[in-house]
Image (spheres, rainbow, N blue to C red):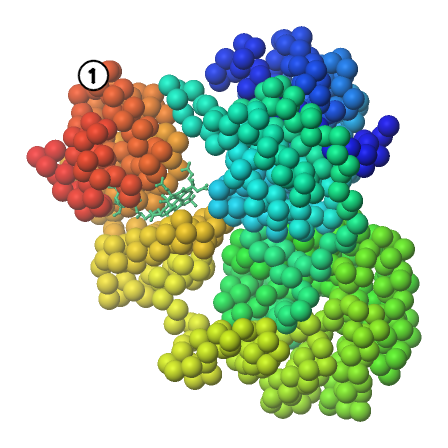
Amino acid sequence: MEFREFLNNKIVLFDGAMGTMLQQNGLKTGELPEKFNITHPEVVTHIHQEYIKAGSDVVTTNTFGANALKLSIENLSVEKVITSAVQCAKKSGAKYVALDIGPLGELLEPMGTLTFERAYKLFSEQVTAGAAAGADLIIIETQSDILEAKAAILAAKENSDLPVICTMSYEEGGRTFIGTDAVTATISLCSLGIDAVGVNCSLGPKEMLPVVDTILKYANVPVIVQPNAGIPRNENEHTVYDISPEEFASYISIMIDNGVSMVGGCCGTTSQFIADLAALTNRKPAKIKKNLIPAVTSSLKTVLLSGKTTVIGERINPTGKKKLKQALKENDFDYIANEAINQTNAGANVLDVNVGLPEINEPETMKHAVKEIQAVSSLPLQIDSSDINTIEAGVRVCRGRPIINSVNGKKAVMERVFPIVKKYGTMVVGLTLDEKGIPETAEGRLKIAENIISTAAEYGIPKDSIVIDCLVLTASAQQSQVMETLKAIKLVKQKLGVLTVLGVSNVSFGLPSRPLINSTFLAAALGAGLDAPIINPLSSEIMSVIDTFRVLNYEDKDAASFINKYSGENNALIKTEMLSNISLYDIILQGRKDEAQKAVRELLKTDAPLDIINKIFVPALNHVGSAFEKGELFLPQLIRSAETVKNAFEIIRDNMNLAECGTSKGKVILATVKGDIHDIGKNIVKMLLQSYNYEVIDLGKDVEISTIIDEAKKNDIRLIGLSALMTTTVKSMKETIESLHIYKIPCKTMVGGAVLTPEYADMVGADFYAKDAMDAVKITESVFN
Ligand code: B1M
């Protein structure tokens, strides 16, 4: 029986951990588990057989890390490793063999350097090898980044016909480590047309319960759950898990009652855990018959479109905007990023992205713009173009589920756009115009909307994915037509039950005081039932209509946001703070990379470089750090703020006149310890030491102990400075200092970094603790004097 049919009949039982079982069968610490497929195939097959004996319907191949990035370290071929892994699984006599695909082990841009295309290619290699070897389905698992998961899903769907399952790993706060919550991940992954969605690893079954309930609420496909055997902890250098098989099964039983239809285990689970689950699997799986709700997502946010007013920011569109046109021609993506930040801060909920200029490569520019905007804004995107290649380029690399702007009632346009909407599971704006143009009457527009919806259904696109734009003509040229749009909005909503969107600003074209016309028309359109106006969120007149309507429409409960924004000193209508006056502190907080250098130059006219570091850089980064810790900011934003400080720091460094240094007072080694990539603080220390005429051998970040030892020996070093920013890497610091003693390097050690205290410095055996960069200079002076 085909797997897709099988999963309708019973609760599907997967297997448990592979790594745990391999370790029990001879895998040594540090050894590549996937190599066992070639060196010890009988062991791998035996493990699969243990799971089958326990009751598994599906066994998962030993290919979690079988991608070219990881295998190349041992010169292993992806095809060879995957082929023998699938053979091992098939030999075990499993009903179904799932090709296992884990994360690539490198972060995608902007958190890392891996491009989407490269990730896609790496996953494609795995899929092609697995499908050729005879896998029955593909399970993409332990994902943290929905863009990486998307690359894997597209690779699976474009290179095979196999069923595709995707699971994410959430931390205790209910988000993945890059900040994606379960609602957002579930909607984003389901929209891509996978066969099952779920969660694995990281948590035990008890901690997973709330995440599983959320997934069940939003998924439109069967839900799979594979928890760890509890929360891992370290005992005598070994990872141990503290849940018994019975306890594990009792939580899984609750999940099945709630609607989960595929179960298994992750780290720490063994065949005994699976045997205990087998008793639960004769129940009939819950029936899934819902569509995805109308919603768009980024990696950090879901915007539900029903029942509330959604502001779509219109500013990233070159029509009539000289500066943006210039920026697009010059590939100035910082300008576009700033437009995104400004609209996000001004209260937009979704950002329209249109980069259409005849003289540029629009698809490439769209890809680039999507990446840059998503690095600075957590809002979902509306990919806007009349060119289908540009639309596909944008939606393909977009983190999350975007809206496409737009399709219309023209047959040829629907034939081009709907396959893309279906393939990427996006939402789509349907313009009420066709081969004959825009109908004069509301009834005519309703008819086109009906046609768009019924044609979309032929492509398998539900009406929940469509937002109709009833189009407004300009009051200056077609005044008699304006009110017809409002009538059409009402009709479309009543008769078709779909959401509506509208580019509002067109109404005022050719008239003076456009914001007046726009805001009056906007109020009328919202009254007629408009759900998602496409407007300029930087216009306070326009936004005040939105804010007011949200109070009157009972969206802004107890008018809390309204009171906050419009009362007393905060009154947004009288606040005149100019964006150009934004402080360096806020520039860092908001990650406005390209504005940082100008702001520093300005400040240097009045402030000392060290004051800028101590009074602005450090507190701003502390602010970002604590917002990150509280879950108010996420990794992409943390990275952006760090990059902003780096840009600003370049100006400070240039200003310190390092070139004027006289003869060297001595050589100092600086390094951020192994496992730690924080280097902003260390770089400040370096700059100050250089300005005091010390020669600094900067070994960089995440530095191996052996590198430090070698450099110290080679350069006859008297002082080594180590930096660490995380509690977890203080241990590395201790190991580094211990090694310096073992190798009898005759030098002093100085340690620093936000996490360190004088007590920690003692504990790691350092000679000196420096609380900040100036302290580091004083200590260095004392050592060399
Ligand atoms: Co991350 N990070 N970060 N981070 N980051 C912290 C350190 C964190 C405290 C944030 C938080 O949760 N509140 C937290 C650590 C928690 C802990 O262990 N207690 C954290 C985490 C968890 C992480 C990741 C694991 C996040 C993730 O991936 N989920 C990840 C770590 C990856 C890794 O290292 N393996 C990560 C990544 C990053 C970015 C890449 C995004 C970025 C670093 C970019 C870079 O450095 N190139 C980043 C940033 C920017 C921070 C915060 C916000 C700011 C650090 C900083 O630059 N401060 C930080 C929160 C915070 O510190 N409040 C945080 C400004 C800098 C000038 O201060 O380094 O203390 P500092 O240096 C001072 C003094 O301490 C002293 O002089 C400097 C100037 O006065 N000093 C020395 C420093 N080194 C010295 C050496 C000396 C002498 C003095 O002698 C040798």
Q: Where is residue 209, by image quadrant? A: top right
Residue 156: x %, y % from top left: 74, 35
Q: Quadrant of ligand 1?
A: top left
The amino acid sitting under disc 1 is Lys
- Left-right relation of 710 to 286: left
Q: Is residue 712 above or below residue 753?
A: above
Residue drawn 37% across the image and 29% down it: 674
Residue drawn 78% across the image and 79% down it: 490
- Left-right relation of 279 to 780: right
Residue 372: x %, y % from top left: 56, 54
Q: Where is residue 651, by image quadrant? A: bottom left
Residue 201: x %, y % from top left: 56, 33
- Left-right relation of 651 to 719: right
Which residue, as the protein is rendered here, is positioned at the far left?
785
Residue drawn 43% across the image and 20% down it: 238
Quarter of the image with the C terminus in it:
top left
Residue 640 showing in the rendered view? no
Q: Nearer the viewer, residue 274 or 378?
A: 274
Q: Nearer the viewer, residue 724 or 279?
A: 279
Q: Which residue is mark 1?
A: 744
Q: Secondary structure at mark 1?
A: loop
Q: Nearer the viewer, residue 114 or 281?
A: 281
- Left-right relation of 721 to 98: left
Residue 339 showing in the rendered view? yes
Q: Is residue 161 above or below residue 415?
A: above
